[in-house]
Image (tube, helix red, strand yellow):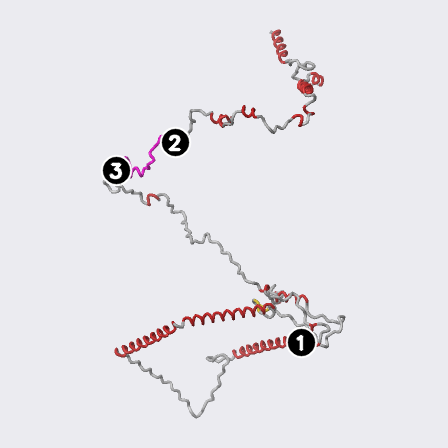
């Protein structure tokens, strides 16, 4: 049995070593080995047949063309055909959807229908589309016997077995839906305001005051405020400043008089006699020793009104009706007399309305002319727009040159008041911060308490 095994092993080794076909170019290929572990076996058993085939292809291109295709330019290899060949177009088959590959694939379907687990319209035989309620109604109309509950035949002569539809009661319909333990849901009543939007407030197209005012931002100072003013201009400015100061003094005196009257009224309020108005005093009546004042406290009885008789009431009614008839007649006569004067009334009304419009336009024009000079001294909103302070020096304080000139006024205050007078900012008054009283901390001495 040993020689047979050796023979089998030698035959298997011979069959594993296969020889490649001899290369058509160059040296024959070496034997292929399954193992190429060593460097010698790696160099010996290498297969260079694909490299030799590529080199042979390059040599064939050089023989046919004269050089390799890689060295040729695009103009030598390609030609742009702008005309075309009509013969080729006629030889090509016409376009048809039936010859498309996608159409052929989709058309290859089996004639046997597919198997579905659910019934389809084709698998279910056609049934009557009449509902059960309509079928029962038709049976009742035709007075045909029909089966009721428990397969009992219902008689059409009984109540509810006619042609009319008798439905179940509401209690049967809603049976099983009521749960006594669930909370009651409060239904929201729609009031129609769910989809309402906030109306957009349209801005009124009114002219602003600053569009009417024409005073400059920096007003030109008066000639009398110069360090070396003319005599006439200086006297005029002093007189104007005197008028302003006198007006302020009169206003202060008036306020002082009002405060004095309020103080006097409060002082009199402490000595008010009961039953008398505020500010009235009652003088004491001196007592007479000789005569006693007799007081008549007797009540005068009222004279009872006598009831009118029937004739008196009828006479009063007749007089009242006659008086009313005379008044109506006079009013009718007056109205008929004024019909002819309708045209004159109309012209008089038009004339009055025209005069009112002219007076209104005149007032608006006067107000506009006043607004052109600014808002100085006018109330705008809560506060009053301040006027410009008149800065003037008396003759003794005037300086003869700029070196000894004393500055007057404040430029920042002038610009701020100018903006208020031109309606660029609202008039305000300075708000002084209120000072809070500080809390005093002290320590209580418990040891000073003697009990």
- Mark 1 is surrounded, within 10 Å at the Cα level, by few (under 14), some (14 to 19) or many (20 or more) other residues, namely some
Give the CA distance from mark 2 to mark 3. 32 Å
Up-down: is 219 above or below 188? below
Nearest to N terminus: mark 2 or mark 3: 2
Q: Nearer the viewer, residue 355 or 224?
A: 355
SS at circle 3: helix
Nearest to N terminus: mark 3 or mark 1: 3
Residue 28 x/y as whole percent:
68, 13
* Residue located beneath label 2 in the image: 121
Residue 87 x/y as whole percent:
56, 24
- Residue 161, located in which quarter of the rendered image? top left
Residue 236: image tag: 1
Residue 142: image tag: 3
Q: Nearer the viewer, residue 254 or 353?
A: 353
Residue 19: image tag: none
Up-down: is 289 above or below 62? below
Q: Decide: marks 3, 1 in contact (CB < 8 A)? A: no
Tell me what residue is drawn at x 43 percent, y 53 percent.
192
Q: Is residue 328 within the magenta segment?
A: no
Q: Is residue 300 left or right of residue 353?
A: left
SS at circle 2: loop
Tell me what residue is drawn at x 54 percent, y 62 percent.
206
Residue 118 seen: yes
- The quadrant of the image that shows the C terminus is bottom right
Up-down: is 218 above or below 156? below
Give the CA distance from mark 3 to mark 1. 123 Å
- Residue 441, located in which quarter of the rendered image? bottom right
Tell me what residue is drawn at x 45 percent, y 91 percent.
288
Q: From which residue to which does the magenta span run?
A: 125-151
Q: Is residue 393 left or right of residue 15?
A: right
């Amino acid at each position: 049995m040993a020689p047979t095994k050796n023979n089998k092993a030698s035959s298997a080794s011979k069959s594993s070593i296969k020889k490649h076909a001899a290369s058509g170019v160059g040296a024959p290929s070496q034997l292929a080995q399954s193992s190429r572990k060593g460097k010698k076996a790696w160099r010996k058993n290498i297969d260079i047949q694909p490299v030799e085939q590529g080199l042979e292809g390059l040599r064939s291109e050089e023989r046919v063309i004269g050089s390799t295709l890689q060295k040729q330019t695009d103009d030598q290899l390609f030609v742009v055909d702008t005309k075309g060949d009509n013969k080729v177009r006629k030889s090509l088959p016409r376009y048809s959807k039936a010859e498309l590959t996608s159409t052929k694939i989709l058309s290859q379907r089996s004639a046997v229908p597919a198997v579905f687990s659910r019934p389809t319209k084709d698998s279910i035989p056609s049934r009557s589309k009449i509902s059960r309620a309509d079928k029962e109604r038709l049976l009742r109309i035709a007075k045909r016997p029909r089966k009721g509950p428990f397969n009992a035949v219902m008689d059409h002569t009984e109540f509810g077995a006619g042609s009319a539809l008798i439905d179940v009661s509401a209690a049967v319909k809603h049976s099983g839906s009521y749960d006594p333990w669930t909370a009651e849901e409060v239904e929201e009543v729609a009031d129609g305001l769910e989809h309402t939007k906030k109306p957009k407030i349209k801005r009124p197209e009114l002219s602003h005051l600053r569009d009417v005012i024409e005073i400059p931002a920096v007003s030109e100072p008066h000639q009398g405020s110069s360090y070396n003013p003319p005599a006439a201009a200086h006297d005029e400015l002093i007189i104007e400043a005197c008028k302003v100061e006198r007006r302020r003094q009169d206003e202060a005196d008036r306020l002082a008089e009002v405060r004095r009257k309020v103080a006097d009224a409060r002082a009199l309020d402490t000595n008010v006699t009961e039953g008398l108005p505020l500010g009235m005093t009652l003088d004491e009546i001196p007592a007479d020793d000789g005569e006693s004042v007799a007081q008549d406290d007797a009540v005068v009885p009222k004279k009872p009104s006598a009831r009118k008789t029937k004739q008196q009431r009828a006479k009063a009614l007749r007089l009242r009706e006659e008086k009313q008839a005379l008044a109506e007649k006079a009013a009718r006569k007056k109205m008929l007399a004024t019909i002819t004067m309708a045209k004159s009334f109309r012209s008089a009304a038009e004339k009055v309305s025209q005069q009112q419009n002219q007076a209104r336009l005149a007032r608006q024009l006067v107000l506009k002319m006043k607004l052109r000079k600014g808002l100085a001294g006018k109330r705008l909103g809560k506060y009053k727009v301040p006027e410009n302070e008149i800065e003037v020096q008396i003759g003794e304080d005037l300086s003869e040159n700029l070196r000894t000139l004393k500055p007057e006024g404040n430029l920042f205050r002038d610009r701020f008041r100018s903006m208020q007078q031109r309606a660029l900012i609202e008039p305000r008054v300075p708000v002084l911060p209120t000072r809070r009283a500080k809390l005093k901390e002290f320590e209580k001495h418990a040891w000073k308490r003697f009990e």
